[in-house]
Image (cartoon, rainbow, N blue to C red):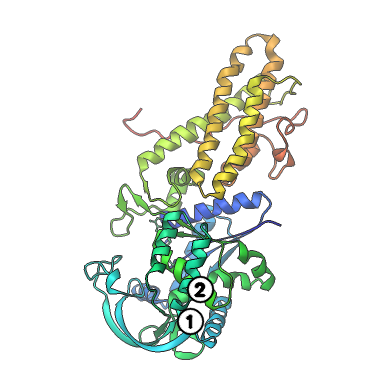
Amino acid sequence: MDRIYITTPLYYVNAEPHLGSAYTMILSDTLARYYRAKGYETFYLTGTDEHGDKIAQAAANAKLDPKEFTDQISATFRAVWDECGFAYDHFIRTTDDYHISYVQEVLNTVYQSGDIYFDRYSGLYCFGCERFYTDKELVNGKCPDHLIEPNLIEEENYFFRMSKYQDHLLRHIETHPQFIRPEGYRNEVLAMLREPVEDLCISRPKSRLTWGIELPFDNRYVTYVWFDALINYVSALKRRGEGEFQKFWPEAQHFIGKDIVKPHGVFWPTMLLAAGLPLYKHLNVHGYWTVEGKKMSKSIGNTISPLEMKQTIGMDAFRYFVLRESVFGQDADFRRESLIGRYNADLANNLGNLVSRVLAMQGKYFAGVVQPLGKQWTDEDNELKSVYEKVESEIGRHLAELQFHRALEVLWAALDHTNRYIVQTSPFTLMKDPANQARVGEILHHLLQAICQLARLLKPFMPDTAKELQSLLAFTEGDPALEASWGNSFAAGHKVSSPKVLFPRIEVPGNE
Ligand code: ME8
């Protein structure tokens, strides 16, 4: 049986869900829905990252105990994702007991094999990033992310022998071109691995931080947050039993943003190698969103909330926009003008009008009852059918390469073609002569068949709209008629519903 395992990063609970995390969710949710509908056994994982300095600090700022604080924000993430309709199979928290004990198991294994050692270390540490920086990584002596000078700290700590696995990983990436994709990020990791890789400090003394997973071999320390959080991708499967791990792990695809390539492209695979676990299949790296050309930030006040999007334009329109407007792997800019432009052109006009026109004609001419198809089909009829057949395989090809925007492009090209079919066949003109009634019935049957295909093909991208289309066609969820071949979806006498405005146009003041 075909299988796929899809993961998102575990979001830090020091901020609330926004356009960036929602984007990762939309990409991964779309892919999970696509493969699920294709019959793949699918496991889709998301969750929250709750230990470490950053979270302890945020809890202190909120004057809450870290556990209380993380309970609250983690619940907010879950509630927002549920409200957005993301169909994840499991939500993991790094404070979950099974995760904590599995992290300790991995630490023990790696410690016992000699790949974790104790050493004195002094280095430049950025508290914001929760990591040490080398001089080379700093920009003008400052952390490139937080733009502050790191602190010099000297400590005794435990180190993971990451350097030992550098060559192994380098060879793996060289021989598996699809391991990290798109290629630009693969090259980024290859460049890191062609320089000497330093061992990774994986402990934090409790004198400095207590909010973490205690090292099983030294209770004076907690685990470095990345050595804890990355392991979630395996602990979530192990919790379901060794069988589930064996089943899904070989098909693991991690979705992440470009900010966390190093932990996922270098730390994580070397950790897997040291723990004696197989490597994941793909690391899928997407770009970053800015808003109206600016970095999204709480202090500027320009963060985009997914729930606000849901309330204003609807979740499906938001999904459509981010998937259509971005190229996987590249940065994208969120502009309200483009959002409204695409909404009006692609959703209100193209998709919405097509569906209303067809259902309105069906209602007016045949009281909604679908008419039979004759044996003889015109060239236009055959072409319409073949356009949809082609689209199906093209979507599959584009999604296999994570080209979400291209998948939607070909789907919308099919919609354009369908609108042209109406112009070419001109059912409203034909209907003026009662002798043409049977032909008009056939044309509308073909058009309803096209909408039926759309309902199926749109499902992973715009699940609510797909459901709405199914109900307008008077099918119940999962009706086998939706999967039937062209011309076989509508039984004799099947009656479709009256039209409904799917996407009301958004009028922009001064732009009429
Ligand atoms: O890094 N554009 O969590 P995090 C696109 N806890 N995506 C964005 C984005 C933006 N402007 N901003 C955030 C962490 N993201 C760790 C991960 S995994 C074991 C631990 C998305 O809350 C993107 O997916 O900072 C990015 O990688 C992630 O949020 C970072 O989330």
In the picture, the quarter occupied by the C terminus is top left
Q: Residue at x 28, y 65 (%)?
A: 144
Against 156, is 399 above or below?
A: above
Residue 349 in the image: state x and y as whole percent: 48, 30
Looking at the rendered image, the quarter that the N terminus falls into is bottom right
**Residue in the foreground of this view, choosing between 146 and 83:** 146
* Near-viewer residue (186 or 301): 186
Kindly tell me whether residue 50 is visible in this rendering: no
Give the Cα separation between the discs numbered 1 and 2.
9 Å
The image quarter in which residue 370 lies: top right
> Which residue is painted at 52% across and 62% down in the image?
175
- The correct choice, above or below, for 441 with respect to 395 in the image is above
Instruction: Name the mark on residue 502.
Output: none
Is residue 140 visible in the rendered image? The answer is yes
Q: Quadrant of residue 54?
A: bottom left
Q: What amino acid type is highlighted by mark number 2? A: Thr
Q: Is residue 475 above or below residue 276?
A: above
Judged from this view, the residue extending furthest toward the left is 140
Residue type, label 1: Ile
Please report whichever mark, 1 or 2, sits nearer to the chain's N-terminal start.
2
Measured as percent of width and height from the top left, residue 46 is found at 53, 63
Q: Secondary structure at mark 2?
A: loop
Q: Which mark is residue 94?
A: 2
Does residue 19 appear left or right of residue 439 in this picture? Answer: left
Mark 1 touches mark 2? (CB < 8 Å):
yes
Q: Residue furthest right?
A: 492
Element type at mark 1: loop
Q: Which residue matches tag 1?
A: 213
Label 2 CA crowd tier, 10 Å (few <14, some 14–19, many 20+): many
